Amino acid sequence: MSFEFVFKRFVQLVILIFVIAVTVFAVLRLTPGDPVAVMMGQEEGVTRADIELKRKALGLDQPLHVQFGRFISGLVTGDLGTSLATNRPVRELLNERFPATLELTIMAMLVSFALGVPIGVIAAVRQNSLADRAIMGVNFLGLSMPSFWQGIMLILLFSVTLGWLPSLGRIDYDLTPPRVTGLMTIDALLAGNLASFVDALKHLALPAITAGTAYSAVIARVVRSSMLEVLAQDYIRTAKSKGLRYGRIIYVHALRNAMIPMITVAGLEAGSLLSGSVVLETVFSWPGLGRLLVDGIYGRDYPLVQSTVILLCVMYVLISFFVDLFYSVIDPRIRW
């Protein structure tokens, strides 16, 4: 990988962040409504003069170009400002919520690959069979179902009807382990608390299955298409003629070479999940970045919304960059 490629991607990242910053700043300011009025509207005895004093204290009375300059300066120095709603540093809020989104992302990706890869391989090996048609039909159904509807159905079945799994939050309050990494499952293991670990997994199950099954349909289709292309190659016929076991041909030779398109899908999946599954986190009351962003939008919390959106975009771009790096690792023919 050349220095020129890395430098170009870095410049693209900087330009993209600037464009996003301008867009988010402009959209928030052009949206009708006063964040200070929203913040102080429920307090008794608040006058217009009180609101104006608060606006001045927050710097919202200054010209837009001054506010934007202060915002960009804060991004460069790492000062993301203070939340208008909670009066807490935005960095602190992001640090609290990011582990929840990361944990859900990891678990959802495990579910999607555990389901999608074997299903895609079976469909490719048994091309045009009844099993293949059934798998593709189920995949089409999975792609068509809205995630919020699937989540609600899972809640009704496993939480309301059967009572097997909790439907809201990350863990029962009484079982919350000491915070080390922010990942409940990891913190529970570090604390040696098996009950907390099991409870955290139970809370993870429904949102992870909801997100994972949706992406598993995409993975299965990509794996099937890629496997069919690989299975038609000459080296696969050579391996068969040498008498290699069919399972070894499929899972060692064919699947390994069919993995390259899956890297792109995995990167897109990770980016989408890390960027905050707003609907999913709302359905399951999951305290992640998506839920934080929704709360900030409702409260017209300028610093929180601006910083959260930029963080999500930066994560997506960085994941795309690392996917490109990984391409050159697994396929030596690719050079950037």
Image (cartoon, helix red, strand yellow):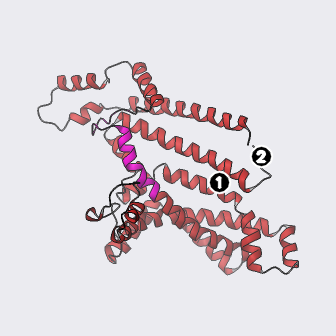
Side of 280 where 126 appears, left or right = right
Q: Position of residue 288 (x, y in %)?
A: 39, 52
Q: Quadrant of residue 70?
A: top left
Neighbourhood count class around disc 1 (C-alpha, 10 Å): few under 14, some 14–19, many 20 upward: some
Q: In which quarter of the image is residue 42?
A: top left
Residue type at tag 1 = Thr
Q: Is mark 2 on a helix, strand or loop?
A: loop
Side of 242 where 86 appears, left or right = left
Q: Residue at horizontal 37%, vertical 57%?
A: 286
Residue 144 seen in render: no
- Vertical arrangement, residue 321 with respect to residue 210, above or below: above
* Dominant SS type (magenta): helix
Q: Position of residue 125 (x, y in %)?
A: 73, 76
Side of 13 where 325 appears, left or right = right
Q: Residue at horizontal 53%, vertical 41%?
A: 314
Residue 277 seen in render: yes
* Viewer-proximal residue among 30 and 252: 252
Q: Is mark 1 on a helix, strand or loop?
A: helix
Q: Residue at horizontal 49%, vertical 57%?
A: 105
Residue segment shown in magenta: 81-103
Residue matched to label 2:
335
- Of circles 1 and 2, the one toward us is 2
* Viewer-proximal residue among 55 and 270: 270
- Vertical arrangement, residue 148 with respect to residue 242, above or below: above
Q: Residue at horizontal 57%, vertical 34%?
A: 16
